[in-house]
Image (tube, grey):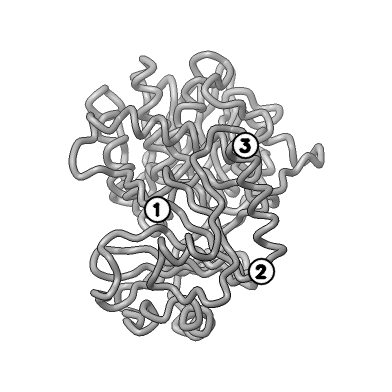
């Protein structure tokens, strides 16, 4: 009988962070199961990689600040090149009512220690002179926001965990979880594993796994597109993640090219990973209007891709033990914030496993039981 202290399902950036923080907390009898042949090849590999503290809920803001602090503390260990680049996030708008909402958000964020400032039209133009800002009334800029290399972060966490004794099994899909005395049985095609604790970090595939244990996890897969332009030498080598708050289109540098993202509100639920060429046509007008230099570079479809968000009804993560299933820990549903919140999520889960509660971040609002209680969280700054 193969028995372990902890089995983690999923070797994406979330599962890798959980493994890393468990090992650093002294829990070394950990096995990570990954359905793919390499780590971080699911949603992690398709992520935009942004990290920001410009949120309007306590939970998201606290998770971001904790993740930033963890990444800063690990900077020397990570070495060069840095995985966390503080290029900033800049939101801009043409609408006075939206700017008023931004001002309220800035006040909320600054009260909680976020480095963010409200910008006037001239300040926006100064920071992004390459954008079309004729009608801009203002915006916000978070200096500590920026980008993370998703795959490199997952590999760092997993590599450190492996050196500390954690084991990973690739091409090994967890097909079911069943309760037993003192823990759980995880079924795979290669056999069963017994564990005191099972961590569901299966990303967009978390819901069907939870269902095998009788746990209703409201996490749905939704396709998201990332477009990559042709070379764009007209832009500086480093620009902020720049978001047109009026249309939802965002751009940032990706090497000598530009990454463009937009969350289609009409995208149906499903495991569709096919890149849709028609998606490009949907965002041509807003990109040309706001970011003409980027539009002029064209879209390189061969370098563009589609991936999956794992979305909850309130666009906030689920972190905590499943109701009625102590020891079955859920860390899912990050709704596009998985990479940025992975460092904090891993530490929170490790603290939950080793100390019985999360001490780094108050995750009570993210508890799985909130959906049944009707205690959903409302975030207004969703991308």
Whether residue 100 is situated above or below residue 277 in the rendered picture: above
Q: Report whether residue 375 is seen.
A: yes
Badge 3 crowding class, 10 Å Cα cut-off, few under 14, some 14 to 19, many 20 or more, is some
Name the quadrant of the C terminus: bottom right
Whether residue 135 is situated above or below residue 86 in the rendered picture: below
Q: Position of residue 81 (x, y in %)?
A: 20, 45
Residue 275 vs residue 314, the one in the foreground: 314
Mark toward the viewer: 2 or 3: 2
Badge 2 crowding class, 10 Å Cα cut-off, few under 14, some 14 to 19, many 20 or more, is some
Disc 2 is placed on an element classified as loop
Horizontal relation, residue 214 to residue 260: left or right: right
Along the polypeptide, which appears first: circle 1 or circle 3? 1
- Mark seen at residue 95: 2
Disc 1 is placed on an element classified as loop
Name the quadrant of the N terminus: top left
To which quarter of the image does residue 296 belong?
bottom left
Q: Residue at x 46, y 54 (%)?
A: 89
- Mark seen at residue 59: 3
């Amino acid at each position: 009988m193969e028995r372990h202290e902890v089995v983690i399902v999923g070797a994406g950036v979330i599962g890798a962070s959980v493994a890393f923080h468990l090992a650093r907390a002294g829990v070394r009898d950990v096995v990570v199961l990954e359905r793919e042949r390499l780590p971080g090849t699911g949603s992690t590999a398709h992520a935009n990689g942004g990290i920001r503290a410009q949120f309007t809920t306590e939970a998201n803001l606290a998770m971001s600040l904790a993740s930033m602090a963890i990444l800063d503390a690990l900077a020397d260990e990570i070495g060069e090149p840095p995985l966390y680049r503080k290029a900033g996030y800049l939101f801009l708008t043409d609408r006075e009512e939206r700017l008023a909402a931004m001002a309220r958000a800035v006040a909320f964020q600054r009260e909680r220690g976020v480095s963010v400032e409200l910008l006037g039209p001239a300040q926006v133009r100064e920071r992004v002179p390459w954008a079309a800002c004729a009608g801009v009334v203002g915006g916000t800029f978070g200096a500590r926001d920026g980008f993370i290399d998703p795959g490199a972060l997952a590999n760092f966490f997993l590599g450190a965990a492996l050196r500390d004794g954690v084991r990973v099994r690739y091409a090994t899909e967890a097909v079911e979880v069943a309760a037993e005395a003192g823990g759980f049985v995880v079924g795979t095609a290669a056999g069963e594993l017994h564990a005191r604790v099972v961590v569901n970090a299966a990303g967009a595939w978390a819901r069907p796994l939870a269902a095998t244990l009788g746990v209703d996890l409201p996490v749905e897969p939704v396709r998201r597109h990332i477009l990559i332009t042709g070379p764009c030498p007209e832009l500086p080598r480093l620009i902020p993640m720049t978001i047109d708050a009026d249309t939802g289109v965002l751009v940032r540098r990706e090497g000598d090219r530009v990454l463009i993202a937009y969350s289609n509100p009409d995208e149906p639920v499903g495991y569709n990973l096919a890149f849709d060429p028609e998606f490009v046509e949907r965002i041509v007008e807003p990109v040309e209007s706001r970011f003409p230099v980027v539009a002029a570079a064209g879209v390189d479809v061969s370098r563009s891709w589609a991936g999956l968000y794992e979305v909850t009804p309130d666009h906030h993560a689920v972190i905590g033990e499943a109701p009625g299933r102590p020891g079955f820990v859920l860390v899912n549903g990050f709704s596009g914030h998985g990479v940025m919140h992975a460092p904090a999520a891993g530490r929170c889960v490790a603290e939950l496993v080793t100390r019985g509660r999360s001490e780094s971040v108050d995750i009570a609002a993210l508890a799985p039981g909130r959906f049944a209680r009707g205690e959903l969280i409302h975030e207004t700054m969703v991308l």
